[in-house]
Image: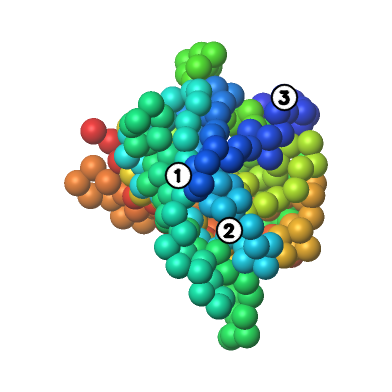
């Protein structure tokens, strides 16, 4: 994995447009999986999860109930092109809405998703893991955006890195044979676009697999199960458009060809915005 020192370039299609869904009947939405979001295996999973999250939010249509939790199981590999999202509202109570959805292509289930949408409520507020004090809110000068390695460059492959700015923390390096499976860095949408819950869902899956930092070569590391919890309601106040967020992904255990990867994302002031958990392949 390499980085480039080129300046931030504008995206061809905004993230909001790339995850757009169109109503196509009761509880059904049409979507189009953009080839610009190609990954090593099919279409990028976090991007597909964000599309489903957008459809669920469109079904709930209550701005007082932002997306709090999105849990995705990747049943089969998504392909570029048309897709359908079917949303079922399981229950909508006084404070929270529970939904589930499926993304399909030509009758084949690609993703199965459950979500919780809920507003803020009185409770105990604390943060035992703010952003580490030594990590600056913005990336140090001279660091470049992550780019896919030349051998992986094909028109239909690993293009998702072009769709957000990711600057890796120089203390974490893919394929560096390090003694920890950890990757971290600064992210933001392109073109000053706002940070939304859907973008966070995608961004928590945007890094290369954390296990790559322990290895000196790529291995199969596709995600099987992926969950994001969003802790903040007013994302615009904590992470205004154009600001970087900082995130880290760490996989502290691996066995039987699987690893569990945990992530955390912080706002510029160090407040935790979201956490994530993934069950990934780890070779084989």
Give the quadrant of residue 235: bottom right
Q: Residue at x 50, y 69 (%)?
A: 92
CA neighbours of label 1 inside 10 A, class few (<14), some (14 to 19), many (20+):
many
Mark with earlier residue (2, 1): 2
Q: Where is residue 245 drawn, in percent x and y?
A: 68, 53
Q: Please tell me the numbered disc located at residue 105.
A: none
Q: Residues within 10 Å of mark 2 (few under 14, many from 20)?
A: some
Tell me how far mark 1 sits from mark 3, CA to CA.
Answer: 28 Å
Disc 1 is placed on an element classified as strand
Say whether residue 225 is left or right of residue 134.
left
Please give the name of the residue rendered at 55% of the width and 29% of the height, measured from the top-left corner.
32
- Where is residue 45 drawn, in percent x and y? 46, 38
Residue at (57, 53) in percent of width and height: 59
Residue at 23% x, 42% y: name it.
257
Judged by depth in the image, the label closer to the viewer, 2 or 3, is 2
Q: Nearer the viewer, residue 52 or 227?
A: 52
- How far apart in space, not on screen, are marks 2 and 3 (Cα)? 29 Å
Q: Are marks 2 and 3 in contact (CB under 8 Å)?
A: no
Marker disc for residue 12? 3
Contact? badges 2 and 1 (CB < 8 Å): no
Horizontal arrangement in the rendering, residue 219 relative to residue 154 (left or right)? left
Q: Is residue 269 visible?
A: yes
Label 3, secondary structure: give it.
loop
Q: CA distance from mark 2 to mark 1?
A: 13 Å
Pointer 2 residue: 60
* Count of numbered marks: 3
Q: Is residue 170 above or below residue 270?
A: above
Q: Can you identify the residue that label 1 sits on?
A: 86
């Amino acid at each position: 994995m390499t980085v480039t020192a080129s300046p931030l370039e504008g995206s061809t299609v905004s993230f909001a447009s790339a995850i757009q869904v169109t109503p196509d009947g009761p509880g059904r939405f049409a979507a189009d999986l953009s080839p610009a979001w190609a990954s090593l295996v099919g279409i990028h999973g976090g991007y597909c999860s964000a599309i489903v999250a957008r459809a669920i939010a469109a079904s709930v249509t209550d701005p007082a109930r932002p997306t709090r939790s999105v849990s995705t199981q990747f049943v089969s590999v998504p392909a570029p092109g048309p897709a359908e999202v079917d949303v079922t509202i399981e229950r909508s109570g006084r404070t929270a809405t529970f939904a589930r959805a499926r993304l399909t292509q030509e009758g084949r289930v690609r993703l199965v998703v459950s979500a919780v949408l809920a507003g803020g409520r009185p409770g105990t507020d604390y943060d035992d893991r703010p952003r580490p004090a030594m990590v600056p809110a913005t990336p140090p000068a001279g660091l470049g955006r992550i780019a896919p390695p030349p051998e992986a460059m094909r028109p239909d492959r690993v293009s998702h890195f072009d769709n957000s700015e990711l600057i890796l923390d120089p203390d974490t390096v893919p394929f560096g044979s390090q003694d920890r499976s950890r990757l971290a860095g600064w992210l933001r949408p392109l073109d000053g676009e706002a940070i939304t819950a859907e973008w966070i869902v995608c961004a928590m899956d945007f890094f290369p697999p954390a296990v790559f930092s322990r290895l000196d070569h790529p291995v199969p590391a596709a995600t099987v199960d992926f969950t994001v919890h969003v802790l903040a309601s007013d994302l615009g106040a904590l992470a205004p458009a154009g600001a970087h967020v900082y995130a880290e992904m760490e996989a502290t255990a691996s066995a039987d060809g699987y690893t569990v990867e945990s992530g955390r994302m912080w706002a510029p002031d160090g407040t935790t915005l979201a956490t994530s958990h993934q069950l990934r392949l780890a070779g084989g």
